[in-house]
Image: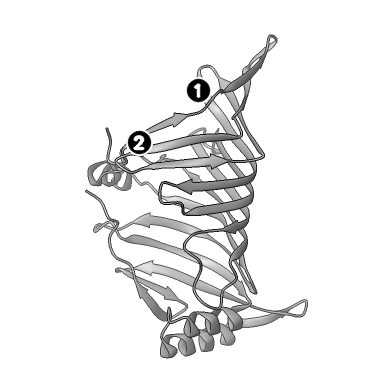
Amino acid sequence: MDARGTWTWRGPWLKALLKPWDFERILVTLPPEHVVEREPGGPVTIAQGLNQIVLIVDDGVVTVLASDVRDMVLTDDQGNAATFAGLQARYERGEDDDGRPRHTYGGKLVDAVFAPPPPAGFPATIAEIAGVIHMMEPLPEGGDRAALGRWRDAGGTVEVDLARLRWGALDVAADGTLALDADFRPLGALTARVAGYDEALAAATDGGGLATGQALALHAALDAMAKDDNGVRRAEIAVTMQDGRLYVGPVPVAPLPPLPLD
């Protein structure tokens, strides 16, 4: 058992479709309801209208793994539920310009509702959460300190092609590079384009998640960099993570503790 525990899957059936002339492409269909369980942890019941997985195998190596899920409901053993109108995920193994392996991961959630409910002032439904990242060195299978340390020391970095959040009026898109510092704290630099920050900062302040002074400082920094984009006020800012702190532009907004590793 690794640091992330042992995972098991249970369901009434599992279908795999292969064509006699194309054994490299496999279509897997999951049942309308099934259970995923982590030990230690607990079971999560998954129900959905559609859940299909495509695998493409080249010389015994999975080069593409893609999933398309519709109308998904995740329910834990306490009865807490999360729902998604759509969930898409994709992994692709390729090569960079120098012929080195390159691992691409992408995902998108549409109309997501999580439990517990969001802070006051924010809508219950998140319209979109999406991301596309690349890594030359894939994350280690063991999520413990030693394995992540070896990954970091071997030059492990995450290239963020896209990170997207649309939640109420807030619309954020970012790209950049992430890594871990010597103390296993997030380290990196991103460029973020932010719209709807007025409403988001007001909601975060009213909900108690952000102090008034922090909100004013952030609003001033965003306003100073905002420009009109087809009638939408949008700020392009630098987001940095260093020395255990998160900065939006020049403003330190939150501490970044080390990852909770064994």
Q: Which residue is mark 2?
A: 141
Q: Amino acid at mark 2?
A: Glu
Rendered image quadrant of residue 33: top right
Kindly identify the residue that appears in the image at 50 percent across and 38 percent down: 102
Quadrant the N terminus occupies:
top left
Residue 38 in the image, given as x and y percentages of width and height: 36, 39
Q: Residue at x 60, y 73 (%)?
A: 194
Q: Nearer the viewer, residue 49 or 191?
A: 49
Question: As displayed, is residue 204 above or below residue 165?
Answer: below
How far apart are labels 2 and 1 at the CA level? 16 Å
Mark 1 crowdedness (10 Å alpha carbons): few <14, some 14-19, many ≥20: few
| Dot placed on the residue nearer the N-terminal end, 2 or 1 | 1
- Identify the residue at horizontal 47%, vertical 86% (top origin): 215
**Colouring convention used in this rendered image of the protein:** one colour
The residue mark sitting in front, 2 or 1, is 2
Across and down, in percent, residue 206 comes to 49, 85
Q: Which residue is mark 1?
A: 61
Dot 2: what SS?
loop
- Percent x, y for residue 71? 65, 46
Front-most of residues 106 and 78: 78
- Of all residues shown, which one is farthest toward the top? 20
Query: What type is the residue that disc 1 sits on?
Result: Val
* Rendered view: 233 above or below 90: below
Is label 1 in a helix, a strand or a loop? strand
Q: Are discs 2 and 1 less than 8 Å apart at CB?
A: no
